[in-house]
Image: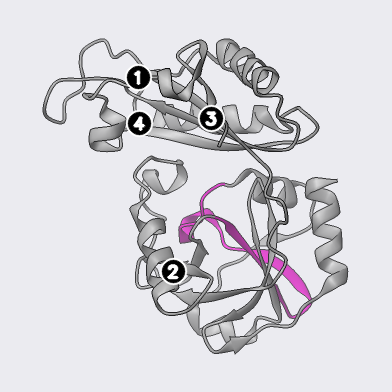
Amino acid sequence: MSDLLWLNGRVLAAADARIDPADRGLLLGDGLFETLRVSGGVTPHVERHLARLARGCATLMMFPPDFAALREGVKDLIGASKLRDGSMRLTVTRGPGPRGLEPPAKPSLTTLLTCSPAAPAPLSTPARLHVSRFTRDGTSPLSQVKSLNYLPGVMARLEASAAGYDDALLPGANGAVAEGSAANVIFLSHGTLTTPPLDDGALPGTSRARLLEAGLCTEASLPLSGLKDVEAGWLVSALSLRAIGAIGACQLRQDASIEETLRRFLFG
């Protein structure tokens, strides 16, 4: 991570930044985040992320941040850090508050941008996924926001690592596949590319939305019992596309042609 960040309108050295110990994001997970790709010194699809953030704020009944200031903050931090390729994380919390669950009558949001350079060599080996006992509830409005309450994903990843896997596949509460621990999933089955619907617990990812809008995949539920029929699969996020090599004992084939099509569309 860069030693510079943007906090509440100012670029600062990370060592000089201060977040109130009473911040509700720290104490209660009361906030949202977005992860943006930085490519060539710009953030492609930033407006998609800001639109999702606005929807998340509405869901949390939290007034939105100043989006004009955020756009300038993104440019200022990229310029100050001289970042060309990598990622940026935007975190917005409801800010400091009194003890307890009720927020103050007039909250003061905490808005933070941090950035990191791209990894020297992105993961290219297919991921082996563990089917997690942790689930996502597609009937809850919170399943459609990038909340700071990320424990299901954290615990699913820890569980998968402890079992010797690379990542986790989380089911929905209805018993269908939802998503990976930090990425949407795309499956090839019977010659068709599909992704789980939001009602099954999938997060409305920005790359997922772009693939659907372009007609490169469609939504379809996949019960866990149907994993045996999956031919190939990929984990997809705003930052990366990674092939799936296996889901539990089910081995998946690698389809270089489809992967190249997806990668070229998403990342140029």
Residue type at mark 4: give it. Leu
The residue closer to the viewer here, 205 or 119, is: 119
Q: Determine whether label 2 and label 4 are within 8 Å by CB.
A: no
| Disc 2: which residue | 171
What's the residue at 54%, 71% (across, down)?
Answer: 166
> Cα distance, mark 4 to mark 1?
24 Å
Residue type at mark 2: give it. Pro
| Disc 1: which residue | 18
Mark in the foreground, 2 or 3: 3
| Disc 3: which residue | 114
Considering the numbered disc 4 on the image, is that residue within a helix, a strand or a loop?
loop
Q: Position of residue 77 (x, y in %)?
A: 62, 20
Q: Earlier in the sequence, mark 3 or mark 4?
A: 4
In the displayed orientation, state which residue is furthest to the left.
Answer: 99
83 displayed left or right of 108: right
> Cα distance, mark 3 to mark 4?
23 Å
The answer to whether residue 256 is above or below residue 141 is: below
Q: Earlier in the sequence, mark 2 or mark 4?
A: 4
Q: Determine whether label 1 and label 3 are within 8 Å by CB.
A: no
The quarter of the picture where the N terminus appears is top right
Q: Earlier in the sequence, mark 1 or mark 3?
A: 1
Q: Determine whether label 2 and label 3 are within 8 Å by CB.
A: no
Residue 246 picture quarter: bottom right
> Cα distance, mark 2 to mark 4?
24 Å
Which disc, if any, is residue 60? 4
Residue 99 picture quarter: top left
Is 199 one of the magenta-colored residues?
yes
Q: Determine whether label 4 and label 1 are within 8 Å by CB.
A: no
Considering the numbered disc 3 on the image, is that residue within a helix, a strand or a loop?
strand
Mark in the foreground, 1 or 2: 1
The segment highlighted magenta reads 183-204
